[in-house]
Amino acid sequence: MAAMQDTVAYKVLTAEDCVALAAGVFKGSPIDLADGFIHLSTGAQLTETVNRHFAGQRDLTIAAIDLVALGDAVRWETSRGGQLFPHLYGPLLPRNVTAQGQMEREADGTVRLPGRAAATQVFFDGGCPVCSREIAFYKKRPGAEAFEWVNVVDSPPQVLGPGLSRELALARMHVRLADGTLLSGASAFAALWRQMPGFRALGWLLAVPPFGVLAEIGYRAFLQCRRLWRSK
C-alpha cells in the first residue's frame, strides 16, 4: 500500500502522444485505450516500465503527473509482479503535467525523473533541424546530465515555467538557471557553456565586453536564417 502515498506518477510518451497532449488532451496510447485507462508508473516503477515496454524505442518523453490534482480519477490497482500501479480513468490534460523531459538515464541505468535531477533547464526549438543537431551534440558531451533538455515543440505550456510563453521559447533559445533566472539568446548560450566542461572559457569570454554584444548580434543574424530551415 506504500505506493498509494505517492503524489506524483510518470507517463512514458511517444512522439505521437506528445502531439496529442500538446494539443490539449491525451486520451491514451493504443494499449491504454484497449485497457480502458491510462497506465502510469511511480518513480520506483518507471525504469522497469521503460525496459519492458519501450525497449529500443527512440524519442520517448517522460511526463510527471500530479496525482493529487487528478483525485478520484486515479485508482491504485494490482498489476506487474503484484505491485500497485496508478491507473488514470479519464483523459490526461496539459495542466496535470508538472514536468516533462526527454527520456534519459542516470549513470546507473535508471530513468531520470523529469524536473528533479537537472539544475539548469535548456529550452530549444525541436522544429529547427540546426538547433536540434546542436542540442544533440551538447547532450553527448560530458556534463550534459546536469541539464534538463526541454523540446519546446513537444512541451505543454506549464512545463516552460513562469515568464516563458511558447511563442517566446520558439523564437529564441532560453536557459533557466537553478535560481529561476531566465536568459535568452547569446546570454543563454553563455550560461550553458559556463556550466559545461570544454566550453567554460568561451562562456566566460562572452561576459567580457564587447564579446557578449557581438555574440548577440551574431545570434540575431542566425535567427533570420533559421526561418528558412525550421520545419513547419
Image (tube, rainbow, N blue to C red):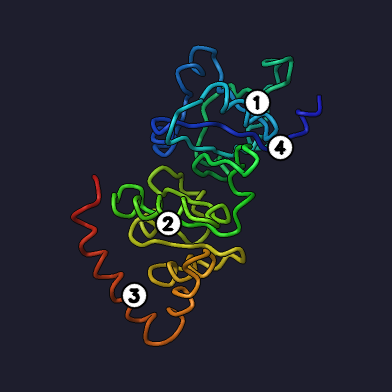
Residue 7 has which mark? 4
Residue 193, given in percent of the width and then of the height, sits at 47, 67
Which of discs 3 and 4 lies nearer the camera? The answer is: 3
Q: CA distance from mark 1 to mark 3?
A: 48 Å
Is 220 located above or below residue 107 in the figure? Answer: below
**Residue at left 60%, top 27%?**
40
Q: Earlier in the sequence, mark 1 or mark 2?
A: 1
Q: Which residue is mark 3?
A: 216
Around disc 4, counting alpha carbons within 10 Å, would you say few (fewer than 14), some (14 to 19), or many (20 or more)? few
Q: Which residue is mark 1?
A: 74
Q: How many marks?
A: 4
Q: CA distance from mark 1 to mark 4?
A: 11 Å
- Compared across the picture, whether 161 is left or right of 70 comes to left
Q: CA distance from mark 2 to mark 3?
A: 21 Å
Q: Earlier in the sequence, mark 2 or mark 3?
A: 2
Residue 110, given in percent of the width and then of the height, sits at 63, 37
Residue most extreme to the left:
228
Residue 91, given in percent of the width and then of the height, sits at 51, 27
Residue 49, given in percent of the width and then of the height, sits at 60, 25
Instruction: Tell me the element at label 3.
Output: helix
Q: Which residue is mark 2?
A: 165
Is label 1 in contact with label 3 (beta carbons under 8 Å)? no
Is label 2 in contact with label 3 (beta carbons under 8 Å)? no
Instruction: Tell me the element at label 2.
Output: loop
Mark 4: which amino acid?
Thr
Is label 2 in contact with label 4 (beta carbons under 8 Å)? no
Mark 2: which amino acid?
Ser
Question: Who is closer to the viewer here, 102 or 146?
Answer: 146
Mark 1: which amino acid?
Val
Q: Earlier in the sequence, mark 3 or mark 4?
A: 4
Quarter of the image with the C terminus is top left
Which of discs 2 and 3 lies nearer the camera? The answer is: 3
